[in-house]
Amino acid sequence: MKILDGQLVSQATKDELKIKVAQLVAEGKKVPHLAAVLVGNNGASETYVGSKVRTCEEIGFRSTLVRLEDTISEFKLLEAIEELNSDMDVDGILVQLPLPKHISDEKVINAIHPSKDVDGFHPVSVGKMVQSLPTFIPATPHGIMLMLEHYKINTKGMHAVVIGRSNIVGRPMSILLSANTNPGNCTVTICHSATRNLKELCLQADIIVAALGKPEFVTADMVKDGAIVIDVGITRVPDATKKRGYSIKGDVQFDTVSPKCSYITPVPGGVGPMTIAALMKNTYNACLAKH
């Protein structure tokens, strides 16, 4: 069993970008600029956005954090996004989800100009991804593909089972794994809450991508020997033995599943760091495309 170390691969990706940014500076060219919009003060969202801003600083990107009250109207938020669309210095825009209930995620995502859609959620980005055209790929699936590429895992001809059908992870992951690329060229099965024979399908899988948000859902009896397991889940589970009062759990029961795997991602330290690295790569490419 080999650990797919997201911290290691993420750092390698960031180091590579740092060198490229230093070269841009040396040549007097524009440095990538990421604008993050945070609505309200959700603890998890604060952590994620803070990490993205710090990573920008580490690499040498410019970053702008736009903080807005959770009482802001949908119209005012869309106005703020339009200002960032019009700002020629801003290369990438991300709006941290989830948003307050009175604001439509769909309207906000659609308001971001496709050329600045570094989260890869805009319908234009998704459409290009489906057609295997150059575009921004959603950060978590992109990060997973970068990790598979780093470890030189040849996925051609493998059967991949993706558990979860969200637009953020499950659906794009199925498209990327089935694409005529390397990594890719898999036969893909998407499983979800209405799948009847989930365990049987997982036992056929050479690759399992667990992205359903249920802690320790995937157990050893669902995984065949030698499988590659990618755990996208990250959930805080109450734990009185911990000083902070909770443990971080993935969607995979790591202790029992890992001995059966050829490769597995840990939680934390697996997919999470790769998501931010992929977002930075998208922002760099957005800047390059414009300038």
Image (cartoon, rainbow, N blue to C red):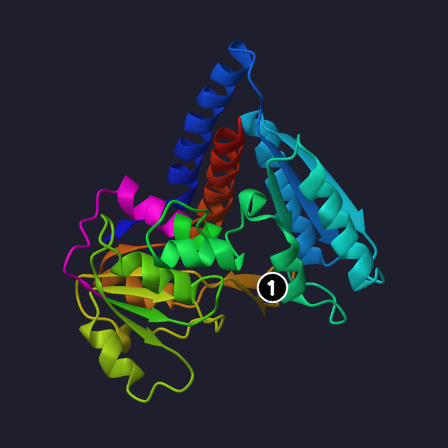
Q: What residue type is labelled 1?
A: Tyr
Left or right: residue 204 compared with residue 146: left
Q: Please count the marks in the image.
A: 1
Secondary structure beneath label 1: strand
- Please, is residue 90 above or below residue 166 in the view? above
Identify the residue at image location x=47%, y=35%.
Answer: 285
Please give the residue where the numbered disc 1 appears in the rendered image.
246
Res. 94 visible in picture: yes
Q: Which of 240 and 98 is in front in this view?
A: 98
Res. 243 visible in picture: no
Q: Position of residue 117 (x, y in %)?
A: 56, 48
* Quadrant in the picture for the N terminus: bottom left
- Please, is residue 35 above or below residue 14 in the view? below
Left or right: residue 146 compared with residue 102: left
Quadrant assignment, res 29: top right
Q: Where is residue 162 in the image (x, y as percent from the top left)?
A: 34, 69
For the view shown, which residue lies furthest in the left direction? Answer: 157
Q: Which of 8 and 87 is in front in this view?
A: 87
Residue 249 is a magenta residue = no
Residue 144 is a magenta residue = yes
Q: Where is residue 267 in the image (x, y as percent from the top left)?
A: 44, 56
Identify the residue at image location x=66%, y=40%.
Answer: 35
Identify the residue at image location x=63%, y=51%.
Answer: 112
**Magenta-tinted stretch:** 143-159
Quadrant assignment, res 200: bottom left
Dot 1: few (<14), some (14–19), or many (≥20) neighbours within 10 Å? some
Identify the residue at image location x=45%, y=58%.
Answer: 126
Q: Nearer the viewer, residue 289 or 54?
A: 289
Q: Where is residue 129 in the image (x, y as percent from the top left)?
A: 39, 54
